[in-house]
Image (tube, helix red, strand yellow):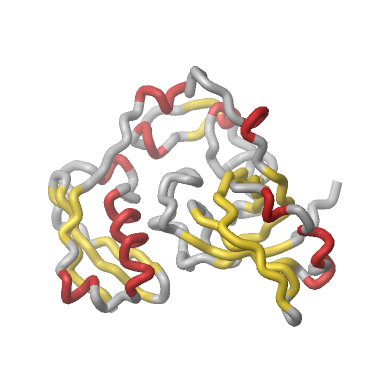
Amino acid sequence: MELKTIAHIHTDFPQKFGLPRQSGLIEELTGYIEFEKEYRNPEAVRGMEGYDYIWLLWGFEVKEDEDFRATVRPPRLGGNERMGVFATRSPFRPNHIGLSSVKLTGVTITVDRGPLLYVSGIDMRDNTPIYDIKPYLSYTDSHENTRNGFTDQVMPHELKVDFPKALLDKLPKDKQDGIIAVLKSDSRPSYHNNGEEDRIYGLCYAGYNIRFKVKNDLLNVIEVT
């Protein structure tokens, strides 16, 4: 079976660090999907404006010659405990396919670029290849009172963010809420949570490099370039 790239998504993240661990966690993060020339027929998206959410099947950026591993170390478990690869959403799997549910915020038909799909709640870096798009159906895709495996044991961790106004104002207004939400979600590996207060992190977002430190549960932004 040959997977064809039908589109690419364009986001504010040129690198993986800083991306949410799952789609839908940070609604302020937006992007748009542009189809490859072969698939720019407006008829292909007819009716899409009637959906609030869509599924995206996309490609992880990993080494193609990566050997199969039956177990992986989920970051949310501190990187020390192993789980079966099929019990996780790790990118290190036999087929490097990601699955994301994103909010569809708009559909625009352009003359030179064909249909453009605007989405929010993204968890993909810029220029990620999209293999397929399907509508999200709440009556079949949503299940109540379900178990969530080891993720039920891991409480969401949110940081307090000190982002000096002089630094925050270097970013466009429409990007400020997004970066604050990203920083709150704590993108660091779990094993950096303790004893790393002197470490300086750098996160690329919307054309800016945001540098910060974390001590206990307080994140301090120290530079924006």
Q: Is residue 9 visible?
A: no
Where's residue 5, x and y in %? 75, 60
Residue occupying image coordinates x 22% and y 47%: 159
Q: Nearer the viewer, residue 41 or 179?
A: 41
Residue occupying image coordinates x 60% and y 66%: 127
Residue occupying image coordinates x 32% and y 47%: 185
Q: Is residue 108 visible?
A: yes
* Image-based side of 118 in relation to 160, left or right: right
* Image-based side of 167 in relation to 109, left or right: left
Q: Nearer the viewer, residue 165 or 151?
A: 165
Query: Is residue 202 positioned above or below 57 on the image?
Result: below
* Image-based side of 11 in relation to 116, left or right: left
Where's residue 182, x and y in %? 34, 55
Query: Is residue 199 positioned above or below 35 on the image?
Result: above
Where's residue 125, x and y in %? 52, 61
Q: Nearer the viewer, residue 202 or 198?
A: 202
Residue 81 image-quadrant placement: top left
Where's residue 189, x and y in %? 34, 45
Image quarter of the C terminus: bottom left
Count of numbered labels shown in the rendering: 0
Residue 39 image-quadrant placement: bottom right
Q: Residue furthest front?
A: 50
